[in-house]
Amino acid sequence: MNLKKVLIKVAAMVAVVFTMVSCDDDFNSVGSEVIGGVNFQDNEYSSIPVAYSKRFEKVQTSALPNYLIGTYNDPIYGQSTYSILSQVLPDRFNPTFGDNPVLDSVVLRIPYFSNITETETNDNGDIVNTYELDSVYGSSVINLSVYKSDYFLRDFDVEEGSEVRQVYFSNDINENFGLEVEERLLFAKNNFEVSSKEIRLLTEDTDVDTDDDPQVSTIPPGFRMALLSDIAADEANVLNPDPNNVRVGSQDLIDYFTSMFLDKEGSLELSNANNFHNFFRGIYFKAEAITTEGTLVFFDITQANITLHYSFEREDTTGDDDTTEIVDDTGELVLNFSNNIVNGIETNFNTTIENELSSQDEINGEENLYLKGGEGSYVVIDLFNRDVTNEDGELENELEFIKRQDWLINEASMKLYINQDMVISGETEPERIYLFNLETGSVLIDYLVDPTSNATNPVNSIIDHLGSITRDSDDKGEFYKIKLTRHVIDLLNEDEDNVKLGLSVSQNVNIITTAEGFTPTNTEDEIIPFSSIISHEGTILYGNGANVPEEKRLKLDIFYTESTTN
């Protein structure tokens, strides 16, 4: 291509650009775009929802994704105590324990959620890991007791039949199960304190080429308590004193476990799950507050266990002449927590808030909205059910009014401001809240299309739809922002019914399954997300009352584009 042709093409392109700019100057006006005499303008409309709170008398605590044990003092709502009742199953049925078995120890282990932050080698050449604990709240001591329970947890609802799983609730242990859950005390630790230190275990040196010093192995942080004979416990504690690894001398309990397991070899009780559940009905973890603060541990109970360590004799054939001799050996039987597991929750609500929650205005809404996890409270949000004055000066249902406007919805969102005058701001404020369809428990369409969904990192998941807490310069919680653009578009297009929405706190927004709950004003069960039940924190948000500061009043802001003609 020669230079002349190139210059001609460049000149043509410049001419086109100047023509477009000239047209733009002729037809664009400030703040609008014009197409054939039609202007498009961006505007904002604010809708005031009706919002109020509901207090739960009890919530479903069976089939939870994880469980809580301990006590927690919420600075707003008061103290809650969490207990656990669980069935157990042995890791094998019809166990054999060898000849002349002797039970050496019974070990309870409760692991914490933790992460290694540093690994180093100490002066003795041992590798030492430093851990950071996750999901431990508070640092005050509590009393922890573990009982064998004699209360039978059935699998199915006797009224509904064998196809409907039995549901257990947060008040069942304290109000319905009675003293049967405390049939026999097995483990007890007064002044129990959570520690992030790894647990160091001593074992016999099995390497004949080295000295006779014990081998040291480590396991991640957790609570470990071993029942031994009195003499064995004294020796173990002298060799390796460790507050995370408690050894208790209790020959009486060693004899008890021997009679329950080793002496039952070949029995029907140990032959299958049904027989075992009726024979050994469960384990009850009971926490008791010592101070007004306490400690609450969130953990995966399916990773906890009770292990019976035993020794026995067996025949061993050695040498070329096949000489048979009697040698000592060891074995273990592991009892895993599984099947029916129930969290008991006893909450002593702040009296003032309790009174507020007993008299909510469900027609006009409330000034303060109370959100509390566990056996707590949630918020009902009713969109577009007010009457508004239309362009003819007549009252009209708000949703019908907006439908007639033919707006192009760009965004619909709510800022839920925290009432900092009533909340103790800081780390006790919940990081996330959760919005759901109150009739079905399902998430909104905005949840399903959120591009920030992160299955492995719930802290930063679904943050476009369910924004995390926004804090001010003093680290005080200021507001949560929830986008529900697609939900509003579907309402206007009549692709979705205008049902009431539920708002709750959430421990993990990736958990979208729901549970049953009961409130004083409704004899039928209501829906509450599991992620709220396993959350212990609470907050107070501003509602739509007349005394709420205008700039913090709950409202749904709709940003839209509309067309107008010249």
Image: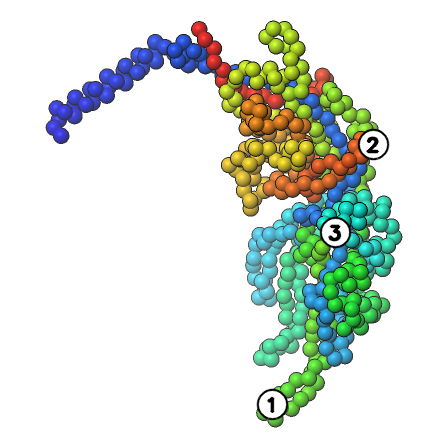
The amino acid beneath tag 1 is Gly
Residue 363: x and y, percent? 74, 21
Amino acid at the residue labelled 2: Thr
* Residue 20 screen position, x and y as percent: 30, 16
Closer to the eye: label 1 or 3: 3
Element type at mark 1: loop
Circle 3 packing at 10 Å, graded few (<14), some (14-19), many (20+), is: few
Along the polypeptide, which appears first: circle 3 or circle 2? 3
Name the residue at the bottom extreme. Answer: 321
Please name the residue that numbered disc 2 is placed on. Answer: 351
Q: Residue at x 23, y 17 (%)?
A: 15
Q: Position of residue 225 (x, y in %)?
A: 75, 61
Q: Give the x, y percent position of residue 542.
A: 69, 24
Viewer-proximal residue, 331 or 522? 522
Kind of residue sitting beneath label 3: Ser
**Quadrant assignment for the N terminus:** top left
Quarter of the image with the C terminus in it: top left
Vertical placement of 369 versus 335: above or below? Answer: above
Q: Which mark is residue 165?
A: none
